[in-house]
Image: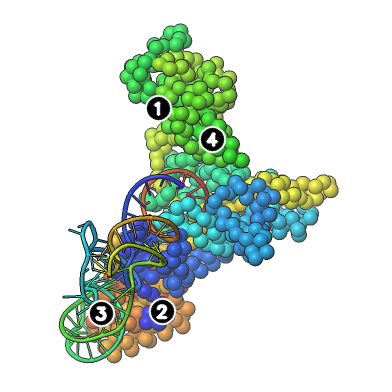
RNA sequence: CGGGGUGUGGCGCAGUCUGGUUAGCGCGCCUCGUUCGGGACGAGGAGGACGAAGGUUCGAAUCCUUUCACCCCGACCA
């Protein structure tokens, strides 16, 4: 391709609203253009990369036995009502009516549609298993789109769904997808990690996320320094915490007058004990379907923090929000003195698993100005759950290694869905005994457009993009230093044609621009290699520049083709 | 949704508080010339009626009202 014929509007100006390198460079280098909040146009370069990523995904999936389909983007709302997600999915679902007043949604994901499709055409266990996917634009009316392609409202996603006769086969396919996804991200040249995840609104159990490691990632990951354990903070577990702090003196359980002592810190000072031996009782307002609200308590060690997603799951709520002091008082709770024992009528409380055997603890008495000391938590007879946020320095449950935080960009997520959707939508098949059973399902997603951002987040320098080999829009760029120099142009044209004939994806910068201008564009766009045809031509040589590291080497003109062949791996 | 902010040529901004010439600057764009290995220089030129609607006024980018869009900070997700 000739640069002079390609629409690549590069720019020096940094858009004011772009903060992430991927956002800035993709805009500046002319890959994408913003059209509205969370909406982007893909220009020729962006489209080339998008198609490359898409092709790799498709290739690996097809090799793994998946089949591509394409479902209609506009989905009848009734399907979403049947699965119960019409209300639950919330405002993110873009809803609208056609001229006849029929309700539709713009698909943000396609479990319903896919189940419907399979339900209509699969009757027998003999037709299973099946793994169907599509690579298609999705629309989610995100509350706050940001970071360019990272979190748009319209985005390209690969969504796949598998159907099985039993759980065992579903788990087999889950593993198959885990391996396939790994191959995809490896081919793309990404440094990623597979972590355990919370299943969120999609539902199901046993989900894993593929995280591209980058400081700008939106997710906090907990990883082990010794083994390969990794988990999203929302799902991370640890060895039960221990403390070196001195244990408080044991005595009889008693109510203790503690006027004005309302925070963990004050309590710690008051009793001269470590927060490890205190119970922190956190109140949240849990929101349920149909606008139902309930105040719930979560009790954890004073040295821990509540993990909101875990807490939300523990009480099966749609969402947790901070309650006001008034709301707490209205159900009989006393802010500053809440505890898991002697609860007001009707207040639900979940205790963290790690507190089950704790003794000699201090907790609120649910009475103004009083705490209880020397509490033996094993007498608690309510609910337990995993509630705490794993901290850096905690110990790995697998190997005892030190856990630390890192940041990641979620580019893939695989779920073991089970029968949640097949049951809700009445999607069944006949097993070998002639018995009707709902499909066991798995669901698998890859954020294709987000991958472009993730690749750049992980591969850039202060000059611009550095595309990985598999994702680069072109393998090599030919830069003519001075197109007024006939000799240079002649050599360049010849090289360009030769490479093209060999099937190399080559970009030929034949623009009437100065050398520095072209170099800057090359660095901004991030093509892996450039051949500079310029002043050294008089000595019979050209220069090869590697974008990563910007190392240059002088190469004899008649050796450049062979060298390129070697470097770009033809 | 709550809090904060911004809308002025293609892009980035100034002007708005303290209404008053033809609305200004940088980048980009077009033409000519010089230059030609790190976003060059000179000369000339095209392009906006100030997010939208309404109002106040002799007069509004500037004041008032309404509205829309976009962005930043918090809860969702590939």
The residue carrying mark 3 is A514
Mark 2 burial class by Cα count in 10 Å: few <14, some 14-19, many 20+: few
Whichever of labels 3 and 2 marks the residue nearer the N terminus, that label is 2
- Disc number at residue A466? none
Residue A395 x/y as whole percent: 43, 33
Whichever of labels 1 and 4 marks the residue nearer the N terminus, that label is 4
The residue carrying mark 1 is A303
Residue A550 placement, left or right of A81: left
Which residue is pictured at 47% across the width and 19% down the height?
A: A366
Task: In this rendered view, identify the residue nearer to me: A187 or A150.
Answer: A150
Residue A477 placement, left or right of A134: left
Mark 3 burial class by Cα count in 10 Å: few <14, some 14-19, many 20+: few
- Disc number at residue A286? 4
Whichever of labels 1 and 3 marks the residue nearer the N terminus, that label is 1
* Labels 3 and 2 within one chain: yes
Judged from the image, the secondary structure of the residue bearing numbered disc 4 is: strand
Mark 1 burial class by Cα count in 10 Å: few <14, some 14-19, many 20+: some
Task: In this rendered view, identify the residue nearer to me: A172 or A368.
Answer: A368
Furthest residue in direction right, as rendered: A434
Task: Tell me the CA gap for discs 1 and 2.
Answer: 59 Å
The residue carrying mark 2 is A6
Task: Tell me the CA gap for discs 1 and 4.
Answer: 24 Å
Task: Tell me the CA gap for discs 1 and 3.
Answer: 62 Å
Which quarter of the image is occupied by the N terminus of chain A?
A: bottom left
Residue A51 x/y as whole percent: 51, 69
Which residue is pictured at 38% across the width and 15% down the height?
A: A258
Whichever of labels 4 and 3 marks the residue nearer the N terminus, that label is 4
The answer to whether the residue labelled 1 contacts the one labelled 4, judged by CB atoms less than 8 Å apart, is no
The answer to whether the residue labelled 1 contacts the one labelled 2, judged by CB atoms less than 8 Å apart, is no
């Amino acid at each position: 391709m000739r640069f002079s014929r390609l629409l690549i509007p590069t720019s020096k100006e940094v858009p004011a609203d772009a903060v992430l390198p991927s956002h800035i460079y993709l805009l500046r280098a002319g890959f994408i253009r913003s059209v509205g909040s969370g909406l982007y146009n893909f220009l020729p370069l962006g489209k080339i990369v998008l198609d490359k990523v898409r092709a790799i995904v498709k290739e690996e999936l097809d090799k793994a036995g998946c089949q591509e389909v394409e479902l209609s983007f506009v989905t009848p709302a009734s399907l979403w009502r049947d699965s119960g997600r019409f209300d639950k999915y919330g405002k993110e679902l873009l809803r609208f009516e056609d001229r006849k007043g029929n309700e539709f949604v713009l698909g943000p994901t396609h479990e319903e549609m896919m189940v419907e499709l399979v339900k209509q055409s699969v009757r027998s266990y003999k037709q299973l298993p099946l793994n169907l996917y599509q690579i298609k634009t999705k629309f989610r009316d995100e509350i706050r789109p940001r970071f360019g392609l990272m979190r748009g409202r319209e985005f390209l996603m690969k969504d796949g769904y598998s159907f099985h006769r039993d759980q065992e086969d579903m788990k087999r396919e889950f593993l198959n997808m885990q391996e396939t996804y790994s191959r995809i991200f490896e081919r793309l040249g990404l440094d990623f990690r597979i972590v355990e995840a919370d299943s969120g609104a999609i539902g199901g159990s046993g989900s894993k996320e593929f995280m591209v490691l980058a400081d700008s990632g939106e997710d906090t990951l907990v990883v082990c320094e010794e083994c390969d354990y990794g988990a999203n903070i929302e799902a991370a577990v640890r060895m039960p915490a221990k403390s070196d702090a001195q244990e408080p003196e044991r005595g009889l359980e008693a109510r203790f007058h503690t006027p004005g002592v309302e925070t963990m810190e004050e309590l710690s000072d008051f009793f001269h004990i470590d927060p490890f031996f205190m119970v922190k009782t956190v109140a949240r307002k849990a929101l349920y379907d149909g606008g139902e609200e309930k105040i719930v308590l979560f009790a954890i060690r004073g040295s821990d923090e509540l993990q909101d997603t875990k807490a939300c799951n523990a009480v099966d709520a749609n969402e947790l929000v901070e309650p006001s002091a008034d709301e707490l008082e209205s159900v009989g709770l006393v802010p500053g003195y809440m505890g898991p024992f002697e609860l007001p009528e009707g207040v639900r409380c979940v205790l963290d698993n790690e507190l089950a055997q704790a003794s000699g603890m201090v907790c609120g008495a649910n009475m103004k100005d009083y705490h209880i000391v020397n509490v033996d938590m094993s007498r608690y007879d309510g609910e337990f759950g995993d509630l705490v946020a794993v901290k850096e320095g905690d110990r790995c449950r697998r190997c005892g290694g030190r856990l630390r935080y890192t940041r990641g960009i979620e580019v893939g997520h695989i779920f073991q869905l089970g029968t949640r959707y097949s049951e809700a939508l009445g999607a069944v098949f006949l097993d070998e005994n002639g018995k009707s059973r709902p499909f066991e399902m798995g669901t698998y997603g890859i954020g294709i457009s987000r991958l472009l951002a993730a690749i750049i987040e992980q591969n850039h320098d202060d000059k611009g993009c550095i595309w990985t080999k598999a994702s680069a829009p072109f393998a090599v760029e030919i830069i003519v230093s001075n197109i007024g120099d006939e000799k240079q142009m002649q050599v360049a044209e010849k090289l360009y044609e030769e490479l093209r004939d060999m099937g190399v994806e080559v970009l030929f910068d034949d623009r009437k621009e100065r050398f520095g201008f072209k170099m800057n564009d090359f660095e901004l766009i991030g093509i892996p290699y450039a051949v500079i045809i310029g002043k050294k031509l008089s000595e019979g040589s050209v220069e090869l520049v590697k974008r990563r590291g910007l190392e240059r080497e002088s190469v004899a003109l008649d050796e450049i083709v062979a060298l390129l062949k070697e470097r770009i791996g033809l």
